[in-house]
Image (tube, rainbow, N blue to C red):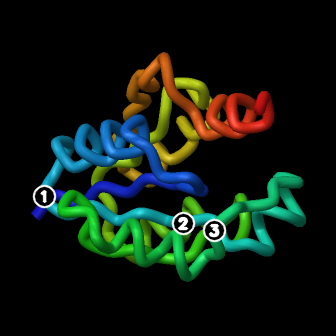
Amino acid sequence: MKRVITYGTFDLLHYGHINLLRRAKQQGDYLIVALSTDEFNWNEKQKKCYFSYEERKQLLEAIRYVDLVIPEENWEQKRTDVKEYHVDTFVMGDDWVGKFDFLKEEGCEVVYLPRTPEISTTQIKKDLNKD
């Protein structure tokens, strides 16, 4: 079984997220999503989520492409997650190109997928604030 992992906040879930998850799942047989916790988002990324970690986790678990959701609590855990979950392929959006190539040292393939260009959570928030 080929295991794939991706990371993200997945707040205000939209079709760009679904596209990423679908394409990530196509890289293997079992998709793990490491979901940023509320604390990690606030303390490390200075991001406040609309939906709580538990709510975002429930949304992701309802998506047919997702096999397992685990918490992302710090930047450094990627290397240990790859080992602990026996991950074959690490997938991220192409806005992160090159940032996670160090995982190749763990024998893990690193794939950067193109983002869905016309949609983002940031854009949704901006558009909603226009009213």
> Looking at the image, do the residues carrying marks 3 and 1 touch, with CB atoms under 8 Å apart?
no
Q: Position of residue 12 (x, y in %)?
A: 56, 52
Is the residue marked by circle 3 packed among few (<14), some (14-19), or many (20+) residues within 10 Å?
some
Q: Position of residue 11 (x, y in %)?
A: 59, 56
The alpha-carbon separation of the residues under discs 2 and 3 comes to 12 Å
Q: In the visual, does 21 lie left or right of 40?
A: left
Mark 1 element type: loop
Label 3 sits on what residue type? Answer: Phe
Q: Position of residue 5 (x, y in %)?
A: 38, 57
Viewport quadrant of the N terminus: bottom left
Q: Earlier in the sequence, mark 2 or mark 3?
A: 2
Q: Earlier in the sequence, mark 3 or mark 1?
A: 1
Label 2 sits on what residue type? Answer: Leu
Q: Residue at x 65, y 75 (%)?
A: 52
Up-down relation of residue 125 to residue 42 (above or below):
above
Q: Position of residue 24 (x, y in %)?
A: 29, 44
* Residue that sits furthest to the front in the current view: 131
* Residue that sits furthest to the bottom in the current view: 54
Is the residue marked by circle 2 packed among few (<14), some (14-19), or many (20+) residues within 10 Å?
many
Q: Which image quarter: residue 71?
A: bottom right
Is the residue marked by circle 1 packed among few (<14), some (14-19), or many (20+) residues within 10 Å?
few
Q: Residue at x 54, y 66 (%)?
A: 35
Q: In the visual, does 83 lie left or right of 22?
A: right
Q: Which image quarter: residue 123?
A: top right
Closer to the observer: label 3 or label 1?
3
Q: Nearer the viewer, residue 43 or 122?
A: 122
Q: Which residue is label 1 attached to?
A: 29
Q: Which residue is label 3 attached to?
A: 51
* Residue that sits furthest to the top in the current view: 117
Up-down relation of residue 62 to residue 92 (above or below):
below
Label 1 sits on what residue type? Answer: Asp
